[in-house]
């Protein structure tokens, strides 16, 4: 490659040139959600800890004030600005709440940052399975009963972590679960990465902070007008030591935090605090209209919870079901991008997920209807798509902690020869992305057969390289 090339810069400008309508992160949608004053001065506001501009790691001035305002707006006792995404907040809340050697109840489909925090902190997982709707082929949420049972079987855990909402906008019964967790004397941590907009309109699901969470994170960049990597960590009450949270954040965040990112967090809070209520009403009204038109066309979308374990749905998350068109979500996503200039946040074997925010205009949203109309007319097939699922209801035997597995000598062996070995990484299949094996778990015959069969039928495996090799702990 010649030195004159700038592959990433060129790829980015290529993407801009296509003028794609963005239904993906970040929530500012190509700058639509920012003021021109900020956008025009990005390089100027990229500064450092000069006098008057405070210090994220010991805030006493402007950053302190901005965090206080965010705390008030999000209903916390304390809020920290994060410049390394919810990932750094998830690490901080788990490490602050769980000392080394302790354990935590976590849903099996949690984000990888959760398992990584367990490795860093030498914390053992007690996995619980979210429910699965076989007809709709959707992993939904964990039930309060599952939490209560897990607490009964594991009275020594430090607490419970929930993911609310999940990628499809589904929230569990956070309030009921908070009562159960607190009655048992434990702490409740909530990964609300996808729900930063929740506190700003009563038609949205209530935020975890209102429902009893002790610590919760928000990825500002996912659903608010804020730059990628920006997030908030919130604390309420005194079940977790807030000074310990601050100390951990000083360890896992850069000593040179971006003032562009921190300004963007201040901006996103300001917009939502002052105008979010009305902007969200507009967004939800426009989306209701879009949903209605899509339904009339025959494209189903998830708009009402039919599952007892799903207490609330995020109405700003558009989840389109392409099964009726005889298309997979992957196929529909590609057609919508290549032919209609619309980029989805993600797709799976059946669904397409669109992130809609206050930065989307009415005409942007209307493009979804036209694009789906074209999809329907040009690409509808008369086939019934069926995918093999990796939904084993069993949780494998934990032979060692994730940290022990991580620090063991690791060997690559063929998946088909891995019976009796201990997984060193996370192994599973799309759809649906719930790991079959997590680090430290015993690999058994039925799991290997299940993974190989899914692969043969066209599913994609993760944690398995192209030669079908996996990482296991050396014997
Ligand atoms: C449920 C969930 N939690 C946490 C994260 C991590 O968030 P971030 O990218 O802000 O670090 C993600 C990222 O997609 C996520 O989907």
Image (cartoon, helix red, strand yellow):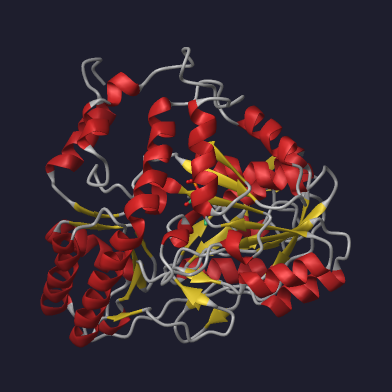
The residue shown at (42%, 57%) is 197
Position of residue 163 relative to residue 119, above or below, is below
Q: Position of residue 177 (x, y in %)?
A: 69, 71
In the displayed structure, does residue 374 sit left or right of residue 7? left
- In the rendered view of the protein, which quadrant contains the N terminus? top left
Instruction: Pick the residue in front: 88 or 225.
Output: 225
Instruction: Pick the residue in front: 440 or 184.
Output: 184
Position of residue 306 relative to residue 151, above or below, is below
Q: Give the quadrant of residue 337.
A: bottom left
Q: Position of residue 291 (x, y in %)?
A: 26, 78
Q: Give the quadrant of residue 204.
A: bottom left
The residue shown at (17%, 51%) is 20
Instruction: Pick the residue in front: 43 or 435.
Output: 43
In the displayed structure, does residue 143 sit left or right of residue 262? right
Q: Position of residue 189 (x, y in %)?
A: 67, 56
In the displayed structure, does residue 310 sit left or right of residue 438? left
Q: Position of residue 266 (x, y in %)?
A: 42, 38
């Amino acid at each position: 490659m010649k030195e004159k090339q700038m592959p990433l810069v060129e790829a980015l400008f290529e993407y801009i040139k296509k003028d794609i309508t963005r239904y993906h992160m970040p929530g500012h949608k190509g700058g639509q959600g920012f003021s021109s004053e900020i956008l025009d001065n990005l390089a100027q506001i990229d500064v450092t800890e000069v006098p008057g501009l405070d210090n994220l790691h010991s805030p006493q001035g402007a950053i302190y004030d901005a965090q206080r305002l965010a705390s008030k707006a999000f209903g916390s006792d304390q809020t920290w600005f994060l410049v390394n995404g919810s990932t750094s907040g998830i690490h901080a809340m788990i490490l602050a709440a769980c000392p080394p050697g302790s354990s935590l109840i976590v849903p099996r489909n949690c984000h990888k940052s959760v398992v990584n925090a367990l490795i860093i902190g030498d914390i053992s997982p007690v996995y619980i399975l979210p429910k699965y709707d076989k007809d709709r082929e959707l992993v939904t949420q964990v039930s309060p009963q599952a939490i209560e049972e897990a607490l009964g079987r594991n009275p020594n855990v430090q607490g419970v972590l929930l993911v609310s909402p999940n990628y499809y906008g589904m929230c569990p019964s956070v309030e009921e679960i908070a009562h159960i967790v607190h009655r048992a004397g434990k702490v409740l941590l909530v990964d609300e990465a996808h729900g930063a907009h929740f506190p700003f309109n009563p038609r949205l699901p209530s935020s975890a902070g209102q429902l009893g969470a002790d610590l919760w994170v928000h990825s500002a960049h996912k659903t608010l007008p804020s730059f990628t990597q920006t997030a908030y960590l919130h604390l309420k009450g005194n079940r977790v030591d807030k000074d310990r949270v601050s100390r951990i954040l000083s360890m896992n965040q850069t000593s040179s935090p971006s003032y562009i990112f921190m300004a963007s967090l201040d901006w996103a809070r300001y917009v939502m605090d002052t105008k979010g209520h009305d902007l969200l009403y507009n967004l939800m009204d426009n989306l209701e209209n879009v949903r209605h038109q899509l339904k009339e066309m025959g494209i189903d979308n998830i708009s009402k919870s039919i599952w007892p374990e799903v207490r609330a749905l995020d109405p700003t998350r558009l989840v389109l079901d392409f099964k009726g068109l005889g298309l997979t979500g992957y196929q529909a996503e590609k057609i919508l991008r290549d032919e209609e200039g619309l980029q989805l946040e993600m797709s799976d074997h059946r669904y397409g997920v669109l992130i809609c925010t206050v930065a989307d205009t009415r005409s942007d949203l209307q493009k979804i209807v036209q694009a789906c109309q074209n999809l329907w007319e040009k690409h509808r097939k008369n086939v019934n798509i069926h995918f093999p699922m990796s939904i084993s209801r069993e949780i494998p035997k934990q032979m060692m902690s994730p940290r022990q597995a991580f620090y063991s000598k690791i060997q690559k062996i063929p998946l088909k020869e891995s019976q009796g070995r201990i997984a060193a990484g996370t192994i599973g299949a799309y759809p649906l992305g719930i790991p079959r094996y997590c680090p430290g778990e015993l690999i058994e015959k039925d799991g290997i057969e299940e993974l190989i069969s899914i692969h043969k039928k066209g599913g994609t495996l993760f944690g398995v390289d192209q030669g079908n090799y996996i990482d296991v702990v050396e014997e």
